Image: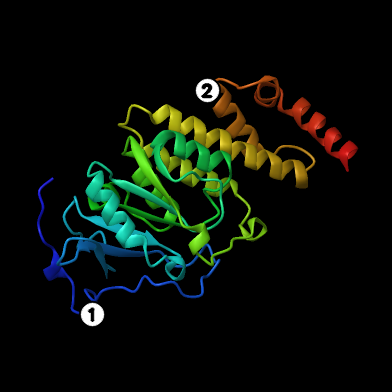
Amino acid sequence: MERTSYAHNLTPQQAAPATLNRVNASSNVDEELVCYWLQTDAAGSQFTASLLPTFPHSTPSEDDFLLFSAERGALPASLLQDVAKLSDQRPELNCFIISLTKRELVNGLHSSTQLFQQLHERRWWQQGGFAVILRAGLARMGAPLSKIQDVMLAGLLHTQTSWVLDYASESSLSINAQDVQPFSYQQFITDYEKLTRLSHFIPERNRYRESYLRSGLLQLVQQELKSSAKFSDNVRHALTYFAENFAAQGVMEKLMLKQPDIYFAIMKMRKKRSA
């Protein structure tokens, strides 16, 4: 990628180095997403961060790294130095997923497809407590970016591998799963439409879509089992769509997709017995 400077598009106030030292962290997953432009310092040993409030309209070079976070207070002081070291050792890296709260995420290199699947299966995707560093070109491909999940999607969809950095032990951020908003059908559809659009030209698109649909459907199904007397029309439609496009995994999933009423009755009975 051609490297050009867009520094002239930043006012002196915008270009001032951003503070990444840890302060009291917020667990609000709806905190405003902010973007920083990472540039190497004079010694070339680490990055400095400049606030970039006008992305993607005044974006740096496509090869430059951008840092996105909705948890500014939880970013560890060592983050920029660690990423600079890694990018120097492994210049092929284009995406870093930074975990700021306790999860069973292994540090190091991951298949982007498998990481996407793990984040959804373990219900971490919607929890917040992440930051993402990725190339400006990748970020532009995923725009508009309104929440950290949009940035993760942009990074994971367009890379073969991603690097996970776990800073839970260095961050004071704590996220209570009970505080996370219930997964709505509207959010399920909106996110799937964006995933479908962004993954249209990648070979692994069906793996991403199947992983997202399976995880999202199971969340919707479990919510309705807790609060409804039967499946809603929306969930029935989603189950039919999944059954027509992807193969079932296991006997119970096949029953859920082919005979949703029977599945619902069985699961309700199980819940009564275990209560």
Instruction: Indicate how the structure is coloured in the image.
Output: rainbow
Q: Relative to residue 40, is residue 104 drawn left or right? A: right
Kind of element beneath mark 2: loop
- Vertical relation: 189 (above or below) 84: above
Query: Dividing the image into 4 quarters, which one contains the C terminus?
Result: top right
Nearest to N terminus: mark 2 or mark 1: 1
Between the C-alphas of marks 2 and 1, the distance is 51 Å
Q: Residue at x 11, y 70 (%)?
A: 8
Q: Residue at x 39, y 72 (%)?
A: 21
Quarter occupied by residue 163: top left
User: Residue 211: x, y in percent?
Assistant: 51, 33
Q: Which residue is mark 2?
A: 246
Task: Give the residue type at disc 1.
Answer: Gln
Residue at the bottom extreme? 13
| Residue in front for this viewpoint, 255 or 73 | 73
How many numbered marks have been drawn onto this rendered protein structure?
2
Task: Give the residue type at disc 2.
Answer: Phe
Q: Relative to residue 197, is residue 226 drawn left or right? A: right
Kind of element beneath mark 1: loop
User: Residue 36: x, y in percent?
Assistant: 29, 65
Query: Dividing the image into 4 quarters, which one contains the N terminus?
Result: top left
Q: Relative to residue 133, is residue 261 drawn left or right? A: right
User: Residue 172: x, y in percent?
Assistant: 54, 67
Q: Residue at x 81, y 31 (%)?
A: 265
Quarter occupied by residue 58: bottom left
Q: Residue at x 24, y 41 (%)?
A: 92
User: Residue 83: x, y in percent?
Assistant: 31, 55
User: Pointer 1: residues within 10 angstroms few (<14), some, or many (20+)?
Assistant: few
- Vertical relation: 146 (above or below) 184: below
Q: Is residue 39 visible?
A: yes
Q: Relative to residue 195, is residue 236 drawn left or right? A: right
Q: Which residue is mark 1?
A: 13
